[in-house]
């Protein structure tokens, strides 16, 4: 029974009590974040008890064909405060693309600000999978993010990305692709997003 000893009360993210209004270590269950998620109060903020599956495209694919314009392929809302002070937003996109030497560019945005720019594809490459991260730095409005490498994995000469998006409020996260030449296709085959 909800509210019994050992069974946390259930809330939506919008109706949860302020973390400062309950004792530290108080656990709640939030029904509308991921598939339902547990959060614990630290006396000031709600912190995740476990990784939160935030978004997935499921079996839906999005293709971009015959354009060099930057085109959105996915978008979702990151609920304000879910990342917390030191949370990590991990995005795992999977693409198929025209096998050519022409550059394909992935951009990830928090609100209007581009926080990750990543080139992928190239001759001999018909697909790509990435593990990209955006991390809050002891603040809900200061982030570092992966850049360069092979879609976020590996070494690169690119500096780590920095941004100042306010993740304490709801913010739109969007993914765009841009191709370097016409007569090509990039398809977002799958996207999985979680908050750590």
Image (cartoon, grey):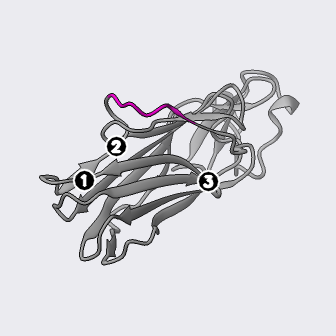
Name the image quarter holding the N terminus: top right
Where residue 104 sits, quadrant-wise, is bottom left
| Residue drawn at the location 87% of the way across and 32% of the way down | 21
Observer-side mark, 1 or 3, equals 1
Q: Are marks 1 and 3 in contact (CB under 8 Å)?
A: no
Q: Please say whether residue 66 is one of the residues in the magenta stretch.
A: no
Tell which residue pokes out farthest to the right in this image: 21
Q: Position of residue 155 (x, y in %)?
A: 33, 28
Where residue 57 sits, quadrant-wise, is bottom left
Magenta residue span: 155-161
Can you see residue 83? yes
For marks 1 and 3, the one nearer the N-term is 3
- Report the residue marked by disc 2: 151
Q: Are marks 2 and 3 in contact (CB under 8 Å)?
A: no
- Report the residue marked by disc 1: 121
For marks 2 and 3, the one nearer the N-term is 3
Label 2 – label 3 distance at C-alpha: 30 Å
- Report the residue marked by disc 3: 32
For the stretch drawn in magenta, what is the main secondary structure?
loop
Depth check, front residue: 169 or 157: 157
| Residue drawn at the location 46% of the way across and 67% of the way down | 70
| Residue drawn at the location 71% of the way across and 40% of the way down | 9
């Amino acid at each position: 029974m909800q509210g019994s000893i050992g069974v946390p009360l259930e809330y939506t993210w919008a109706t949860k009590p302020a973390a400062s209004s309950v004792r530290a270590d108080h656990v709640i269950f939030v029904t509308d974040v991921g598939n339902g998620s547990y959060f614990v109060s630290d006396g000031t903020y709600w912190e995740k008890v476990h990784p939160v599956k935030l978004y997935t495209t499921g079996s839906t694919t999005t293709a971009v064909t015959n354009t060099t314009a930057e085109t959105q392929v996915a978008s979702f809302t990151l609920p304000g405060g879910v990342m917390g002070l030191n949370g990590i937003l991990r995005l795992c996109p999977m693409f198929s693309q025209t096998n050519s030497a022409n550059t394909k560019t992935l951009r990830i945005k928090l609100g209007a600000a581009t926080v990750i720019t990543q080139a992928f594809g190239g001759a001999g490459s018909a697909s790509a999978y990435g593990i990209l991260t955006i991390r809050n730095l002891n603040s809900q409005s200061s982030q570092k993010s992966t850049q360069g490498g092979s879609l976020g994995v590996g070494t690169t000469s690119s500096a780590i990305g920095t941004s100042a998006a306010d993740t304490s409020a709801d913010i739109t996260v969007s993914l765009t692709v841009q191709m370097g030449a016409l007569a090509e296709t990039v398809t977002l085959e799958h996207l999985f997003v979680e908050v750590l």
